[in-house]
Image (cartoon, helix red, strand yellow):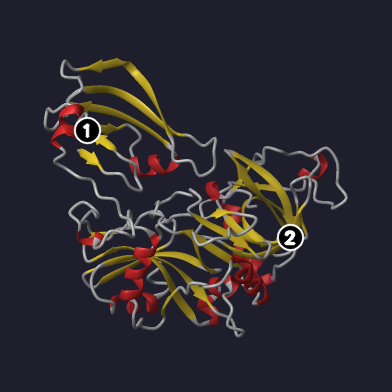
Amino acid sequence: EGTIPPGNYGAGTVMVWDQGEYEDLTGNPAAAFHQGKMHIIMRGKKLMGEWILVKDRREEGSNKWLLIKAGQPLTLSAKADDTSAISGRSMRKIAQDNDAQWQSNTPAEKDAKHGPTSHRVMKPAFVEPMQCKPVKELPGGDDWTFEIKFDGYRCFATKEGSKVTLFSRNEKKLNTRFPAVAKALAELPGDFAIDGEIVAVDDAGKPSFQLLQNSGEQNPPIYFYAFDLLNHAGEDFHRAPIEQRRALLQELLEVPPDPVRLSPLLDAPAGHILEAVRKLGLEGVVGKRIGSRYEAGERSGAWIKMRTDRQQEFVLGGYVPGTHGFEMLLVGVYEKKRLIYVAKVKDGFVPRTRDAIFPALKKLQIDNCPFTNLPEAKASRWGEALTAAKMKECRWVKPVQVCQVAFVEWTDGGKLRHPSFVAMRDDKKAGAVVRES
């Protein structure tokens, strides 16, 4: 508690109004938090009672939560007044004393990383990676830095002592699959938590997700491109601005061991960057707002992405039976909690791919269609509609698997033109798959 000086975080006085314990009623508070609904009982010095916290999803990328009273009526102790639960001081007294300053992590701070409150000292640990908000055009001006959007597996790497752990965005361990990356990161000094991307490179030197997924069979060159540093030597940098985190990462990776690489910054106007990325046939561009903090699991708009190709992830909701198990896959995206059918995917498969996918589909088979916008009334000019008659040919599956699909464009009716299968994605959660602009 104390007085916050003017700066990036505004100014004012902050009090620790209550202090106590809470009891989680969901059985898994971390999962409940990420799902956006928590059910807790609070037992504070002042506040007691049962509460439900629900994340406000009316605006994409919002970090607002709704606090709803549940169970018995609200109970306040006799000490529920305008005083701190720690010091007993009032807001006015805290402001007068001015004895604790909260420090902001701005570039202007001479040596912010050594400030007593600028970083939280903690061990490196997995956090849900920060997400990029899709945009239709890149912003101009000097407020953004740009990097290549790699077509690979998002990888959050932690090192504690000599132990390195590679996590997918779903917190699955990747060490067995990419041992060379883990071994190389173990050579770097100190403990750390690094956000990056594991990428397979084709003969033309371009990232290829298909090669990455089949890396166990084809053995292509594999690289880990690091682009953010969240923890090093016991210091936490989530609240530090992106440019400071980038500078510390560059210092750590001054001579990176193979196959570790520092994701390069693209130093040019946004229009020139986009043109060059398109000519090189790369997936797209990532932009990061200067001064932004690392917002774990959020898509706030401080990080953005613009694709130069037409690809994204889709949820598998069914299939049409055929040779090697299926003729085509039925895919969709989520709109809030509704799974919306968008395409039949027939192209892009080889017999080996069908043979690899089909056993999992059979295990997930269900009786009812998971798509909420089916059946459709009539076939369209593109032939992708699923009428009630056509649905009789389909088999439905539990919508938990994700695949990546390339396509020409979205139609006015919200369907895909000429979709083609690229690869399965076991690093993405089905519930997070939405239509990207």
Give the residue displayed 39% in from the left and 55% down from the top. 294
Give the residue displayed 35% in from the left and 64% down from the top. 245
Distance between the alpha carbons at the discs numbered 1 and 2: 55 Å
Q: Residue furthest left?
A: 87
Q: Judge from the rendering whether residue 176 lies leftward or rightward of residue 120; answer left or right.
A: right
Q: Quadrant of residue 116?
A: bottom left
Say which residue label 2 marks. Answer: 419
Q: Residues within 10 Å of mark 2 (few under 14, many from 20)?
A: many
Label 1 with label 2: CB-CB less than 8 Å: no
Q: Judge from the rendering whether residue 37 lies leftward or rightward of residue 189; answer left or right.
A: right
Q: Position of residue 177 (x, y in %)?
A: 43, 72
Q: Residue furthest bottom?
A: 203
| Residue type indicated by callout 2 | Pro
Q: Nearer the viewer, residue 177 or 239?
A: 239
Q: Position of residue 230 (x, y in %)?
A: 33, 61
Q: Quadrant of residue 88?
A: top left
| Residue type indicated by callout 1 | Met
Say which residue label 1 marks. Answer: 15
Height in image: 372 above or below 365?
A: above
Give the residue displayed 74% in from the left and 65% down from the top. 347
Tag in front: 1 or 2: 1
Height in image: 328 above or below 146?
A: above
Q: Which structural element holds mark 2?
A: loop
